[in-house]
Amino acid sequence: MNLSDFLNSKNYNSELKIIISNIAAGSIQICERMNEDGANIFGSVGEKNIQNEDVQKLDLIANEIFIDIFNNQSSVKSILSEENENIIELNNSAKYIIAMDPLDGSSNIDVNIPVGSIFSVLKNNKNGFLQKGCAQELACYVIYGTTTMLVFAIDNAVFGFSLNLKNKEYMLTHPNIQTPINGSIFSINEGNYNSIDSEILSFINYCKELSPHGKRTHTGRFVGSLVADFHRNMLRGGIFIYPKTGDKPNGQLRLIYECNPIAFIAKHTNAKSTNLNLDILDIIPSKLHERTAFVVGSKNMVDKLLSFYN
Ligand code: F6P
Protein backbone atom coordinates (compact mmCIF):
# COMPACT_ATOMS: atom_id res chain seq x y z
CA MET A 1 0.00 0.00 0.00
CA ASN A 2 1.39 3.42 -0.86
CA LEU A 3 1.56 6.30 1.61
CA SER A 4 -1.37 8.25 0.22
CA ASP A 5 -3.70 5.21 0.21
CA PHE A 6 -2.54 4.47 3.75
CA LEU A 7 -3.27 8.02 4.92
CA ASN A 8 -6.66 8.02 3.15
CA SER A 9 -7.57 4.85 5.02
CA LYS A 10 -6.86 6.42 8.42
CA ASN A 11 -8.82 8.74 10.67
CA TYR A 12 -5.84 10.89 11.59
CA ASN A 13 -6.18 14.66 11.93
CA SER A 14 -6.16 16.05 8.38
CA GLU A 15 -3.43 18.62 9.13
CA LEU A 16 -1.15 15.87 10.43
CA LYS A 17 -1.81 13.90 7.24
CA ILE A 18 -0.69 16.92 5.21
CA ILE A 19 2.45 17.26 7.34
CA ILE A 20 3.34 13.58 6.80
CA SER A 21 2.87 14.04 3.05
CA ASN A 22 5.00 17.21 3.13
CA ILE A 23 7.83 15.40 4.94
CA ALA A 24 7.59 12.56 2.43
CA ALA A 25 7.77 15.00 -0.49
CA GLY A 26 10.74 16.86 1.00
CA SER A 27 12.64 13.67 1.70
CA ILE A 28 12.11 12.48 -1.90
CA GLN A 29 13.64 15.74 -3.14
CA ILE A 30 16.63 15.25 -0.82
CA CYS A 31 17.04 11.64 -1.91
CA GLU A 32 16.98 12.72 -5.56
CA ARG A 33 19.60 15.41 -4.89
CA MET A 34 21.82 12.81 -3.20
CA ASN A 35 21.48 10.37 -6.06
CA GLU A 36 21.56 12.75 -9.01
CA ASP A 37 23.96 15.42 -7.87
CA GLY A 38 26.49 13.53 -5.70
CA ALA A 39 29.44 15.72 -6.64
CA ASN A 40 27.68 18.87 -5.49
CA ILE A 41 26.42 17.76 -2.11
CA PHE A 42 29.77 16.95 -0.51
CA GLY A 43 31.68 19.44 1.58
CA SER A 44 31.08 22.16 4.09
CA VAL A 45 30.00 25.72 3.36
CA GLY A 46 32.81 27.04 5.54
CA GLU A 47 30.56 28.35 8.31
CA LYS A 48 29.66 27.23 11.83
CA ASN A 49 26.05 26.95 13.02
CA ILE A 50 24.91 28.30 16.38
CA GLN A 51 25.99 24.99 17.93
CA ASN A 52 29.54 25.68 16.68
CA GLU A 53 29.38 22.75 14.25
CA ASP A 54 30.60 22.95 10.63
CA VAL A 55 27.63 23.53 8.34
CA GLN A 56 27.62 21.07 5.43
CA LYS A 57 26.13 21.87 2.01
CA LEU A 58 23.52 19.16 2.49
CA ASP A 59 22.50 20.61 5.88
CA LEU A 60 21.47 23.82 4.13
CA ILE A 61 19.90 22.09 1.12
CA ALA A 62 17.73 19.92 3.41
CA ASN A 63 16.80 22.87 5.63
CA GLU A 64 15.67 24.95 2.63
CA ILE A 65 13.73 22.08 1.05
CA PHE A 66 11.67 21.38 4.18
CA ILE A 67 11.08 25.05 5.07
CA ASP A 68 9.90 25.74 1.48
CA ILE A 69 7.53 22.79 1.46
CA PHE A 70 5.95 23.62 4.84
CA ASN A 71 5.69 27.25 3.77
CA ASN A 72 4.11 26.55 0.36
CA GLN A 73 1.54 24.18 1.80
CA SER A 74 0.61 26.55 4.65
CA SER A 75 0.55 23.47 6.84
CA VAL A 76 2.74 24.71 9.68
CA LYS A 77 2.64 27.69 12.02
CA SER A 78 6.32 27.83 12.87
CA ILE A 79 9.54 25.85 12.61
CA LEU A 80 12.43 25.34 14.98
CA SER A 81 15.39 24.00 13.02
CA GLU A 82 18.80 22.87 14.16
CA GLU A 83 20.18 25.15 11.46
CA ASN A 84 18.51 28.36 12.66
CA GLU A 85 19.01 30.10 15.97
CA ASN A 86 15.51 31.57 16.04
CA ILE A 87 12.05 30.23 15.35
CA ILE A 88 10.88 30.67 11.74
CA GLU A 89 7.29 31.91 11.53
CA LEU A 90 5.33 30.59 8.53
CA ASN A 91 1.54 30.53 8.66
CA ASN A 92 -0.13 32.09 11.63
CA SER A 93 -3.45 30.36 11.09
CA ALA A 94 -1.97 26.81 11.15
CA LYS A 95 -2.33 24.74 14.33
CA TYR A 96 0.90 22.78 14.38
CA ILE A 97 4.53 23.68 15.01
CA ILE A 98 7.47 21.55 13.88
CA ALA A 99 10.92 21.12 15.42
CA MET A 100 13.36 19.50 13.03
CA ASP A 101 16.89 18.38 12.43
CA PRO A 102 16.75 18.54 8.61
CA LEU A 103 19.98 16.55 8.22
CA ASP A 104 21.06 14.35 11.10
CA GLY A 105 24.55 12.80 11.07
CA SER A 106 26.19 15.60 9.07
CA SER A 107 29.72 14.29 9.75
CA ASN A 108 28.78 11.17 7.75
CA ILE A 109 27.67 12.94 4.55
CA ASP A 110 31.08 13.05 2.88
CA VAL A 111 31.93 9.44 3.75
CA ASN A 112 28.76 7.91 2.31
CA ILE A 113 27.27 6.61 5.53
CA PRO A 114 23.48 6.82 6.20
CA VAL A 115 22.10 10.13 7.41
CA GLY A 116 18.57 11.18 8.33
CA SER A 117 15.97 13.90 8.88
CA ILE A 118 14.03 14.15 12.16
CA PHE A 119 10.70 15.90 12.95
CA SER A 120 8.72 16.58 16.11
CA VAL A 121 5.17 17.87 15.63
CA LEU A 122 3.36 19.66 18.46
CA LYS A 123 0.09 21.56 18.69
CA ASN A 124 0.92 25.19 19.32
CA ASN A 125 0.05 26.53 22.78
CA LYS A 126 1.33 29.23 25.13
CA ASN A 127 4.55 27.25 25.73
CA GLY A 128 5.32 26.98 22.02
CA PHE A 129 8.28 24.64 21.49
CA LEU A 130 9.00 24.38 25.23
CA GLN A 131 6.55 21.51 25.74
CA LYS A 132 7.25 18.05 27.13
CA GLY A 133 7.95 15.40 24.49
CA CYS A 134 4.87 13.45 25.60
CA ALA A 135 2.76 16.26 24.08
CA GLN A 136 3.93 15.39 20.55
CA GLU A 137 1.13 14.36 18.20
CA LEU A 138 3.41 13.07 15.48
CA ALA A 139 7.10 12.18 15.38
CA CYS A 140 8.85 11.18 12.24
CA TYR A 141 12.24 10.44 10.76
CA VAL A 142 13.62 9.64 7.36
CA ILE A 143 16.70 7.46 6.98
CA TYR A 144 18.66 7.80 3.75
CA GLY A 145 20.32 4.36 3.81
CA THR A 146 20.37 1.28 1.60
CA THR A 147 16.83 2.39 0.87
CA THR A 148 15.22 5.64 1.93
CA MET A 149 12.68 4.98 4.65
CA LEU A 150 10.06 7.14 6.31
CA VAL A 151 9.15 6.09 9.86
CA PHE A 152 6.49 7.82 11.93
CA ALA A 153 4.61 7.46 15.19
CA ILE A 154 1.00 8.59 15.35
CA ASP A 155 -2.01 7.41 17.38
CA ASN A 156 0.12 5.00 19.47
CA ALA A 157 1.56 3.08 16.51
CA VAL A 158 4.71 3.22 14.39
CA PHE A 159 4.85 2.57 10.64
CA GLY A 160 7.77 2.33 8.22
CA PHE A 161 7.53 3.09 4.48
CA SER A 162 10.28 2.39 1.93
CA LEU A 163 10.82 4.64 -1.07
CA ASN A 164 10.36 3.37 -4.59
CA LEU A 165 12.47 6.03 -6.27
CA LYS A 166 11.31 5.14 -9.77
CA ASN A 167 7.66 5.90 -8.94
CA LYS A 168 8.59 8.50 -6.29
CA GLU A 169 6.29 6.66 -3.93
CA TYR A 170 6.63 5.45 -0.36
CA MET A 171 5.30 1.90 0.16
CA LEU A 172 4.27 0.44 3.52
CA THR A 173 6.93 -2.16 4.38
CA HIS A 174 6.94 -2.10 8.20
CA PRO A 175 3.43 -2.01 9.71
CA ASN A 176 3.18 -1.67 13.49
CA ILE A 177 6.90 -1.77 14.34
CA GLN A 178 7.80 -3.28 17.73
CA THR A 179 11.22 -3.19 19.40
CA PRO A 180 12.31 -6.50 20.95
CA ILE A 181 12.22 -6.24 24.75
CA ASN A 182 15.72 -7.75 24.94
CA GLY A 183 18.57 -6.92 22.62
CA SER A 184 22.25 -7.62 22.10
CA ILE A 185 23.47 -4.40 20.43
CA PHE A 186 25.05 -1.57 22.40
CA SER A 187 25.76 1.71 20.63
CA ILE A 188 28.01 4.28 22.25
CA ASN A 189 30.97 6.34 21.10
CA GLU A 190 33.68 4.64 23.14
CA GLY A 191 36.02 7.53 22.37
CA ASN A 192 34.31 9.14 25.38
CA TYR A 193 35.21 6.20 27.64
CA ASN A 194 37.41 8.23 29.98
CA SER A 195 34.93 11.04 30.53
CA ILE A 196 31.63 9.28 31.29
CA ASP A 197 29.92 8.02 34.47
CA SER A 198 31.42 4.91 36.09
CA GLU A 199 27.91 3.36 36.02
CA ILE A 200 27.95 3.49 32.21
CA LEU A 201 31.43 1.98 32.14
CA SER A 202 30.12 -0.86 34.33
CA PHE A 203 27.27 -1.39 31.86
CA ILE A 204 29.69 -1.44 28.90
CA ASN A 205 31.85 -3.97 30.73
CA TYR A 206 28.73 -6.05 31.40
CA CYS A 207 27.96 -5.97 27.65
CA LYS A 208 31.50 -7.21 26.97
CA GLU A 209 31.23 -10.26 29.25
CA LEU A 210 31.71 -13.61 27.53
CA SER A 211 29.35 -16.56 27.71
CA PRO A 212 30.56 -19.73 29.49
CA HIS A 213 31.58 -20.95 25.99
CA GLY A 214 33.79 -17.91 25.43
CA LYS A 215 31.45 -16.22 22.93
CA ARG A 216 30.59 -12.55 23.12
CA THR A 217 27.18 -11.86 24.67
CA HIS A 218 26.62 -8.49 22.94
CA THR A 219 27.82 -6.69 19.86
CA GLY A 220 28.96 -3.07 19.65
CA ARG A 221 27.70 -0.89 16.75
CA PHE A 222 28.02 2.89 16.45
CA VAL A 223 27.31 4.59 13.11
CA GLY A 224 27.47 8.16 14.39
CA SER A 225 24.12 9.13 12.80
CA LEU A 226 21.48 9.00 15.54
CA VAL A 227 18.74 7.99 13.12
CA ALA A 228 20.75 5.06 11.73
CA ASP A 229 21.84 3.82 15.16
CA PHE A 230 18.30 4.10 16.48
CA HIS A 231 16.68 2.50 13.42
CA ARG A 232 18.89 -0.59 13.65
CA ASN A 233 18.35 -1.00 17.39
CA MET A 234 14.59 -0.43 17.06
CA LEU A 235 14.28 -3.28 14.54
CA ARG A 236 16.86 -5.66 16.03
CA GLY A 237 16.84 -4.88 19.76
CA GLY A 238 19.58 -2.83 21.36
CA ILE A 239 20.49 0.29 23.30
CA PHE A 240 21.83 3.68 22.18
CA ILE A 241 23.72 5.73 24.78
CA TYR A 242 24.97 9.31 24.43
CA PRO A 243 25.71 10.41 28.00
CA LYS A 244 27.12 13.61 29.45
CA THR A 245 30.83 13.79 28.80
CA GLY A 246 33.72 15.84 30.15
CA ASP A 247 33.60 18.32 27.29
CA LYS A 248 29.81 18.15 26.80
CA PRO A 249 28.47 18.37 30.36
CA ASN A 250 24.87 18.52 29.08
CA GLY A 251 25.30 15.76 26.49
CA GLN A 252 25.57 16.11 22.72
CA LEU A 253 22.05 15.58 21.43
CA ARG A 254 19.33 18.21 21.28
CA LEU A 255 16.24 17.50 23.35
CA ILE A 256 13.50 19.13 21.27
CA TYR A 257 14.29 18.03 17.72
CA GLU A 258 16.51 14.95 18.17
CA CYS A 259 15.73 13.14 21.44
CA ASN A 260 12.01 13.90 21.82
CA PRO A 261 10.89 12.60 18.41
CA ILE A 262 13.12 9.53 18.65
CA ALA A 263 11.90 8.87 22.21
CA PHE A 264 8.26 9.24 21.09
CA ILE A 265 8.74 6.75 18.27
CA ALA A 266 10.61 4.43 20.67
CA LYS A 267 7.78 4.57 23.20
CA HIS A 268 5.23 3.47 20.63
CA THR A 269 7.41 0.52 19.58
CA ASN A 270 7.49 -0.57 23.25
CA ALA A 271 11.03 0.69 23.84
CA LYS A 272 12.18 3.10 26.55
CA SER A 273 14.19 6.33 26.82
CA THR A 274 15.80 8.26 29.66
CA ASN A 275 18.28 11.01 30.45
CA LEU A 276 19.43 8.65 33.27
CA ASN A 277 17.15 10.49 35.66
CA LEU A 278 13.83 11.14 33.95
CA ASP A 279 11.89 9.66 31.05
CA ILE A 280 12.94 11.84 28.09
CA LEU A 281 9.28 12.53 27.26
CA ASP A 282 8.71 14.04 30.74
CA ILE A 283 11.42 16.71 30.56
CA ILE A 284 10.20 20.33 30.35
CA PRO A 285 12.65 22.06 28.00
CA SER A 286 14.01 25.37 29.25
CA LYS A 287 15.55 26.56 25.98
CA LEU A 288 15.16 25.91 22.27
CA HIS A 289 18.48 24.23 21.48
CA GLU A 290 18.84 22.47 24.85
CA ARG A 291 21.06 19.39 24.98
CA THR A 292 20.55 16.30 27.09
CA ALA A 293 22.08 12.95 27.94
CA PHE A 294 20.12 10.37 25.92
CA VAL A 295 19.60 6.65 26.34
CA VAL A 296 17.04 4.81 24.23
CA GLY A 297 16.37 1.19 23.39
CA SER A 298 15.01 -2.21 24.35
CA LYS A 299 13.27 -2.01 27.73
CA ASN A 300 15.32 -4.67 29.48
CA MET A 301 18.61 -3.17 28.29
CA VAL A 302 17.67 0.34 29.44
CA ASP A 303 16.53 -1.07 32.81
CA LYS A 304 19.81 -2.99 33.13
CA LEU A 305 21.78 0.23 32.57
CA LEU A 306 19.61 2.10 35.10
CA SER A 307 20.18 -0.71 37.65
CA PHE A 308 23.87 0.31 37.82
CA TYR A 309 22.71 3.72 39.10
CA ASN A 310 20.54 2.26 41.88
O1 F6P B 1 24.14 15.59 16.96
C1 F6P B 1 24.15 14.86 15.84
C2 F6P B 1 24.99 13.58 15.82
O2 F6P B 1 25.66 13.57 14.59
C3 F6P B 1 24.13 12.34 15.98
O3 F6P B 1 23.48 12.00 14.77
C4 F6P B 1 25.12 11.30 16.44
O4 F6P B 1 24.51 10.27 17.19
C5 F6P B 1 26.09 12.10 17.27
O5 F6P B 1 25.95 13.48 16.86
C6 F6P B 1 27.50 11.65 17.11
O6 F6P B 1 28.32 12.37 17.94
P1 F6P B 1 29.87 11.98 18.14
O7 F6P B 1 30.54 12.35 16.86
O8 F6P B 1 30.30 12.78 19.31
O9 F6P B 1 29.93 10.50 18.39
Image (cartoon, rainbow, N blue to C red):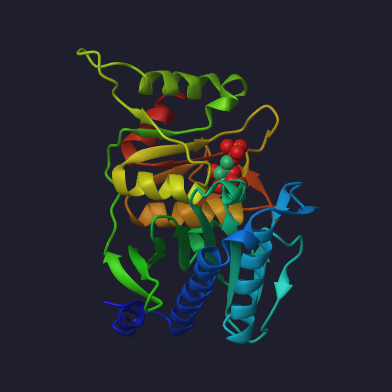
Quarter-of-image position of residue 161:
bottom left
Name which residue lies at 46% across and 59% down.
144
Name which residue lies at 42% across and 35% down.
221
Q: Is residue 132 left or right of residue 238?
A: right
The spot of residue 285 in percent (x, y) is 64, 53
Residue 126 visible from this viewpoint: no
Front-most of residues 308 and 144: 144
Q: Is residue 281 above or below residue 26?
A: above
The spot of residue 158 in percent (x, y) is 34, 62
Name which residue lies at 24% across and 16% down.
211
Quadrant where the N terminus is found in the figure: bottom left
Residue 53 visible from this viewpoint: yes
Front-most of residues 136 and 68: 68
Front-most of residues 281 and 86: 86
Quarter-of-image position of residue 174:
bottom left
Q: Is residue 194 left or right of residue 202?
A: right
Q: Is residue 206 left or right of residue 91?
A: left
